[in-house]
Amino acid sequence: MWAADLWFSPSENMERIRDAGLGGGVFPIHVDARSLPFPPEFFDAVVAVDSFPYFGTDDLYLNYLSRFVKPGGQVGIAGAGLVQEIGQSVPDHLQSWWTQDLWGLHSAAWWRLHWERTGIVDIVVADTMAEGWERWLEWHLAVAPDNEPEIRALGVDRGRYLGYVRVVGRRNGEVLLADHVESIPPRYTRTSLLRDDHRA
């Protein structure tokens, strides 16, 4: 297992892995999800926990990520999300907590559509955890008790909008993935940058 993370150091993650007794089978790396260093069809499954909304809403990202999964393999996400989509304006009870990055949060139904329309994966499950907002709140109270705006928002919302989302898709091996373009080979031909003809 490769534990890819951008925000936590691999050294710190290695300590967690060893404390869990998994030192011989889990390899932490520091990497951006948009620059993964793996060859095509490297994984049987890819799972993103509490991270996918930061990069996965990009219409092209599922195509990019699926290149690393074997045909028939699974792509799964789990984490904070919405029970129902928020329209043009944020509900009053969430206004004091809401910031621009939270527009990346979506419902299971939104993720289902976002993935299904590509044909890249066949959806196995797309749902919201029962009482997910309570798990979210418990996590904050244990790990980030000083995050008063988010704790207050979860307590007031009580699962109307905020919850935990899970989506799993199986890669459809019959769908041809678009090539991931990292650079375009230069074909520069020297030409004059000034026109010879200066007539009006």
Image (cartoon, rainbow, N blue to C red):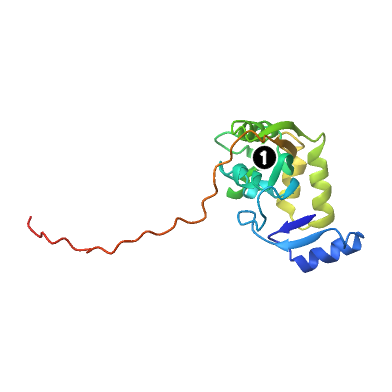
Residue shown at 80%/36% (left/top)? 129
Asked if one can make out residue 6 in the rendered structure from this viewpoint, the answer is yes
Q: Residue at x 85, y 58 (%)?
A: 25
Residue 177: image x %, image y %? 58, 40
Q: Disc 1 residue type?
A: His
- The reply, left or right, for residue 110 in relation to residue 8 is left
Q: Is 39 located above or below residue 172 in the figure?
A: below
Depth order, front residue of 19/87:
19
Q: Nearer the viewer, residue 99 or 10?
A: 10
Callout 1 secondary element: helix
- Say which of 15 and 1 sits in front: 1
Residue that carries the numbered disc 1 in the rendered image: 93
Q: Residue at x 80, y 63 (%)?
A: 13
Counting other residues with Cα less than 10 Å from the Cα at mark 1, is it few (<14), some (14-19), or many (20 or more)?
Answer: few
Q: Position of residue 62 (x, y in %)?
A: 62, 42
Asked if residue 99 shows in the view, the reply is no
Residue 136 is drawn in which quadrant? top right
Up-down relation of residue 174 to residue 54 (above or below) = above
**Residue 89 percent coordinates (x, y):** 56, 37
